[in-house]
Amino acid sequence: MYSEGVFQFYFMNMPQPVILIQQEKHQLYYKECNKAAQQFFDKMEDKIINKEENLLFYTLCEKAIAMKEPIQYQYIQLFQPDRLTFTPLFNQATTPSDVLVMAQEIHYKKTQEESTRLLDAFLENTVDAILIADCDEKVLTVNGAFEKLFQWRKEEVIGKSRQEMNIVSKKEEKENLKLIAELKNGKTLPPYETVRYTKSGESVCVSGSCSPIYDYQNQLVAYSVIYRDITAIKRLELELIKSKQWYKSLFTNHHHAVCMLNLDGTILNINSAFLETLQLSASDVLHQNYRDIAKRLGACNYKSWNVYEEISYSTELTFRRSQHSIQHVYITTIPVKVNNQTVGAYAILHDITPQKEAEEQLAYTLKELENIKYALDESASVMIINASGIITYVNDMYVQYSGYEKEDLLGKYYRDAELHHDHHELLETIKSGKVWRGQLEMETKHHQSYWVSKTIVPLKDIDGNITHYVSIHNDITEQKALENKLHFEATHDSLTGLPNRAMLLKELNKVIENGQRKSDEFFALLFLDCDNFKQINDEYGHHIGDEFLKAYTKRLKSCVRKGDRIYRLGGDEFIIILNVTNGREIEQIAGRIHVSLQQSWNVRGYCLRTTTTIGVSIYPEDGESAALLLKNADDALYKGKREGKNNYILYQT
């Protein structure tokens, strides 16, 4: 803690130049200088200290505040030294707030700036990494190349012990200390190669050189270490050693045929693969001209190669030794140069017969696939969807049938194009990689319904993963309409359009099956017979009888409710299945039907009167099978006939 008045007296009257630096909000300011320093800092126009331009000064001030103790620093110039002392001053909270900077010698500012610029220019413009340390192993400065090579920032290392950076491994530190000791004794050290380490621990091959630094009184005050990154050079040296080894094994280990030729085209050396590839002996090849060998092998697309060409040359040759023996080879020639003069060439031959045969087979297969695609496009609608559901292809026939344009579909998600089918079995089948076949009802772009016979084939890659789905379908709308017509005719009465006996038995069994699953299921079966239908046919003719049956059917439909079903067994016999809950409801509906059917009929101008007898059986009390329910309803009907007709009778055991 200091007194402001006493401090000001000593501060202004000290013979040494002194500057007072203030820290506020992590920023340093010039606060004041004494009389001895005013000749150099009298203006102090820029109160804020620029960290980038005064990095060393800034770093030492911050370090004195952080350490809470004085720091001495000898500024090394090319001409004369200045020794600076940085002393932190404490406020009442015992926290340093100011720094007192005292200089033993301050030379003319111009000389300082010139020498500083010269030193900075030397350090920052060299590509070699430079570290300068004082005799106590404290780092004074490093250049930008050092920061880049070793990943240490300048502000991190200034004032730090050189050993703290771990640039030298612990194993080599003793040897390094010996070198530095020799340097401090004034011995000049020759350049040496070694390994140093970056901040992150990565090794770097370097060429190092150390130099002593003397002050103007010829006293050793520091030393510099210059590191040159020779990692690339070492890598090249290693590659050169490897390449020599590879060169030695080129002829013996290369799996392709290799030979060396001189400028005349004479073969000087070969490897064993060369003889195996061309099925020749060494005596057939060595010291022979390559042109003669090519002719002997029956090269049919032979082109003479000029060994004087200075660029690599590649070509394909076909050897026809006989009508049934064809060999395809790919030849690459590489000029050999010594002192920038072409002295010969390497020739590398690769037997590509299997590839050529595969290419021919592939071309044949592609042509077959093209023909298949053409046939498919001409006969069916085709769409291809990738595994993500994006439409990648549609053919013209698909466009023709669906009403969509290709631009409506290509690149679209199939659900967004309204082409999805909520068909669980279909989706599960194709997702499992199996082919799905079936019939689907689809809609055109304009919402017109049409039927297709569809086949969806999953396509897989070599790893068995599904990449696409090919959807192939044919329009079966007319066929489906014919099938529906035939099915309707087989299951419905042609005159009245009502379901016939076959449909009755099928649906009655289904209703009974549902009833067996539900203990409270209850329904009634009404068996109707027109009492005097034969008389109408005999008196007015069958055509009037047919018209009467149509009118009879229409009136029956008006009597029943939604969910009730009417069937015609044949002639004047009809069946009604009523969904009811109790016997009273059965009698109400049966009575209403009975009364309605007694009313007169106007058929083609004829006023007809007729009555109907109805027999009723109830599930499950009158039977739990279709046959028994029909039999009991029929028994009730004939009981009603015997009792005078024109009534409805419930079956009784």
Image: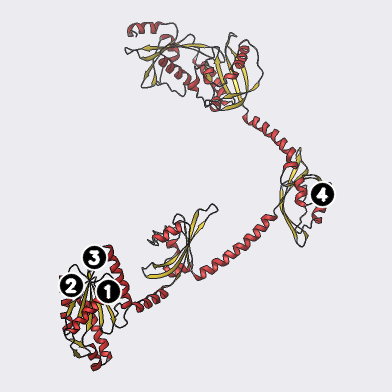
Which label is found at residue 647?
none
Q: Nearer the viewer, residue 150 or 501?
A: 501
Q: CA distance from mark 3 to mark 2?
A: 14 Å
Q: Pointer 2: what residue? A: 586
Disc 1 crowd rating (10 Å Cα; few below 14, some 14-19, many 20+) is some
> Rounded to the nearest whole Å, what is the CA distance between mark 3 and mark 1?
17 Å
Residues at marks 2 and 4, CA–CA distance in whole angstroms: 108 Å
Q: Nearer the viewer, residue 55 or 138?
A: 138
Amino acid identity at mark 4? Ser
Residue type, mark 1 in image? Leu
Measured Cα–Cα span from mark 4 to mark 1: 99 Å
- Could you say where residue 378 lies in the image, as x and y percent from the top left? 51, 70
Task: Residue 335: give x, y in percent of width and height.
Answer: 74, 44
Could you tell me which secondary element the residue under label 2 belongs to?
Answer: helix
Q: Amino acid at mark 3?
A: Glu
Residue drawn at 45 percent across, 7 percent down: 16
Residue named by callout 1: 628
Residue 575, position as x, y percentages in the image: 25, 77
The answer to whether the residues at label 1 and label 2 have Cβ atoms under 8 Å apart is no
Residue 517 percent coordinates (x, y): 28, 63
Residues at badges 3 and 1 in contact (C-beta under 8 Å)? no
Q: Secondary structure at mark 4?
A: loop
Estimate the spatial distance between the alpha carbons at disc 1 and disc 2, rounded to whole Å: 19 Å
The kind of residue on which mark 2 rests is Ile
Residue annotated with mark 3: 521
Per the model, the C-alpha gap separating discs 3 and 4 is 97 Å
Residue at horizontal 62%, vertical 29%? 231
Indicate the quadrant where residue 524 lies. bottom left
